Image (spheres, rainbow, N blue to C red):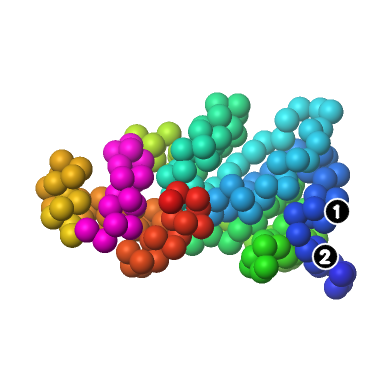
């Protein structure tokens, strides 16, 4: 469906069919997402014949709790992409050459709706929001160095939270003090964007962590 300079596409297959040529021609690509699933279709886009586009990717910390996702991002970084991590809420978006913005909608019945925007003033507004969050983000290498222990402990902490055991028992199991364990739980909740332990469990399941 087309409405003015907003194109609405439904599902990844249609998104890829409608935008693959834009990805192939782009010289600068910026992306913000909560995980690697939102923009899975864009990874199928054919490569351009010329130089690789400048690539910037911005993610919430939860993406690094999945070992395969973390490995993928580090590989992209090694290949030249700039990747940053932000604790702020992100509007899931792809920006192509600052001329096209693709916004991700909610996932309904297993299919997501995407809005393709080309109105210059609207794209500029979306770009400004992305740039502000990007500037406040932490480079992936720096974030890794600061939170290496959390990534290692996350699977066990999630397992213990799911078991319903008391903090004292969980702390002993991990060889941590209770205060340290609770601090790791709080860090994990923050990485998952969760306000409660229950919500952390829900988010962890959404990310395929448990």
User: Which residue is at a point 45% across and 60% down the rendered structure image?
Assistant: 203
- Residue 95 visible in the shown view: yes
In the displayed structure, 196 sits above or below 61; it is below
Residue 42 picture location, percent across and down: 72, 46
Identify the element where label 1 is drawn: helix
Q: CA distance from mark 2 to mark 1?
A: 10 Å
- Left/right of residue 177 with respect to residue 198 in the rendered view: left
Looking at the rendering, which quadrant does residue 115 occupy? bottom right
Is 156 one of the magenta-colored residues?
yes
Q: Nearer the viewer, residue 100 or 67?
A: 67
Q: Earlier in the sequence, mark 2 or mark 1?
A: 2
Residue 131 picture location, percent across and down: 57, 53
- Residue 85 visible in the shown view: no
The mark found on residue 7 in the picture is: 2
In the displayed structure, 176 sits above or below 205; it is above
* Quarter the N terminus occupies: bottom right
**Residue at the far bottom in the pictured view:** 3
Identify the element where label 2 is drawn: strand
Residue 101 picture location, percent across and down: 72, 57
The mark found on residue 18 in the picture is: 1
Is 187 one of the magenta-colored residues?
no
User: Which residue is at a point 72% across and 35% down the rendered structure image?
Assistant: 53
Q: Are marks 2 and 1 in contact (CB under 8 Å)?
A: yes
Looking at the rendering, which quadrant does residue 2 occupy? bottom right
Q: Nearer the viewer, residue 192 or 90?
A: 192
- Left/right of residue 136 with respect to residue 196 in the rendered view: right
In the displayed structure, 132 sits above or below 42; it is below
Instruction: Point out the stretch of residues depicted in magenta.
Output: 148-165
User: Which residue is at a point 17% across and 49% down the rendered structure image?
Assistant: 171
The mark found on residue 136 in the picture is: none
Q: Nearer the viewer, residue 17 or 124?
A: 17
């Amino acid at each position: 469906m087309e409405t003015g300079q907003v194109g609405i596409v439904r599902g990844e297959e249609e998104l890829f069919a409608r935008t693959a040529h834009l990805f192939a021609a782009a010289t600068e690509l910026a992306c913000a997402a909560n995980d690697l699933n939102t923009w899975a279709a864009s990874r199928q886009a054919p490569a351009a014949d010329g130089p690789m586009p400048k690539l910037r990717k911005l993610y919430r910390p939860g993406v690094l709790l999945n070992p395969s996702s973390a490995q993928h991002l580090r590989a992209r970084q090694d290949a030249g992409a700039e990747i940053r991590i932000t604790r702020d809420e992100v509007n899931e978006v792809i920006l192509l050459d600052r001329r096209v913005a693709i916004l991700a909608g909610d996932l309904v019945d297993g299919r997501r709706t995407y809005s393709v925007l080309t109105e210059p003033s609207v794209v500029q507004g979306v770009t400004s929001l992305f740039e502000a969050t990007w500037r406040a983000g932490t480079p992936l290498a720096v974030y890794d160095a600061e939170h290496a222990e959390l990534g290692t402990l996350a699977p066990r902490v999630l397992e213990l939270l799911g078991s319903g055991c008391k903090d004292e028992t969980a702390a002993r199991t991990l060889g941590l003090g209770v205060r340290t364990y609770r601090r790791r739980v709080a860090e994990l909740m923050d990485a998952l964007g969760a306000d409660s332990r229950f919500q952390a469990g829900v988010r962890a399941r959404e990310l395929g962590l448990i």
